[in-house]
Amino acid sequence: MKIHHIRNATFVIESDSYHILIDPMLSQKGVLPPFARFKHKPRKNPMVSLPDNASDILNKVTNCLITHSQKFGIKALQHTDHLDKAGELFLKNKKIPVVTHEQDSSYLKKHGFNIEISLKYWQKTEQFGGSIIAIPALHGHKWINKFMANGAGFFIELPDEPSIYISGDTVYTNDVEKVLLEFKPDIAVMASGCASLDIGGPILMPHDELITFVRNAPGKVIANHIETLNHCPTTRLQLKNILENKGLLSKVLIPDDGETLTINK
């Protein structure tokens, strides 16, 4: 299996004839507003450009997974760090089949996306020649997750490939722990930016929860959702130092934008 990390939470899983795009945020640098203006420096998003090889990676895409997109069904509140206007145009123009959780599927259908499968939590579904399970993702602790509108992670098993768990935007929960300890994914993709808004607490795992995630992961962890958005303060270097201090760095891959990781079963 190859993991082509593009930027933030956007990457492509390459397996056999499938090139599966995850959460396309494909805007040029600085065209989106800041996601926080007081708690974090109000820089426009994305803060970095797409990598030079992004077009080559995207040209091979055959399918798409979207962990979450809508908030109360209101277009203006769409989670553009996982599906922005450029990502929408890419998917629609190429008529890419999309797999997502049922709470997002009707919203995306309404806006013209080619929804191939609408997943229910914990229900194993045949897909990509293997199977996929949608896992609940809690987008923040306490009341903030109600405002954020929670999405899903995905546990995917493909023929002759390592199993992979994509956490999606979540804090650490019993559901996350269940996947790590019971499903035992060979690869776990961890949203690592420690995001927060101007109101409420963390909407992604803070550092202590990232450490717990890595400790409980049975295989390799890939850290993403970092160094792209103004409300995600954790840097690659900071995460590396935290993991190194805990003796966990050897378990974690922190790819650069545009980097390809090859992971065998």
Image (tube, helix red, strand yellow):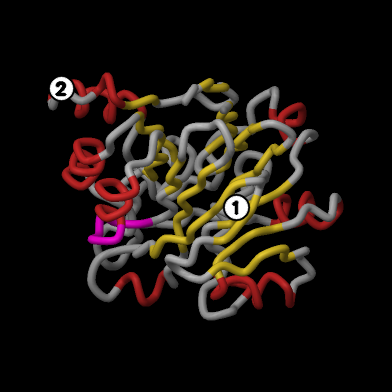
Q: Is residue 76 magenta?
A: no
Examine the rendered structure and indicate whether residue 254 appears above or below residue 121.
Answer: above
Q: Which residues are magenta?
A: 170-175
Q: Nearer the viewer, residue 228 or 105?
A: 105
Residue 13 in the figure: left or right of residue 97: left
Residue located at (27% from left, 55% from top): 178
- Amino acid on which the number 2 mark rests in the picture: Gly
Examine the rendered structure and indicate whether residue 187 appears above or below residue 181.
Answer: above
Q: Quadrant of residue 105?
A: bottom right
Nearest to viewer (mark 1 / mark 2): 2
- Where residue 202 appears, x then y in whole percent? 27, 57
The secondary element bearing badge 2 is classed as: loop
Q: Quadrant of residue 4?
A: top right
Q: Give the labeled residue for mark 2.
A: 247
The Cα atoms of the two marked residues, 1 and 2, are separated by 37 Å
Residue located at (38% from left, 45% from top): 232
Dots 1, 2 in contact, CB < 8 A: no
Q: Nearer the viewer, residue 146 or 127?
A: 127
Return the disc, 1 or 2, that comes first in the chain's sequence: 1
Which quarter of the figure is the N terminus placed in? top right
Residue 35 in the figure: left or right of residue 105: left
Q: Give the labeled residue for mark 1.
A: 32
Examine the rendered structure and indicate whether residue 257 appears above or below residue 65.
Answer: above
The secondary structure making up most of the magenta span is loop
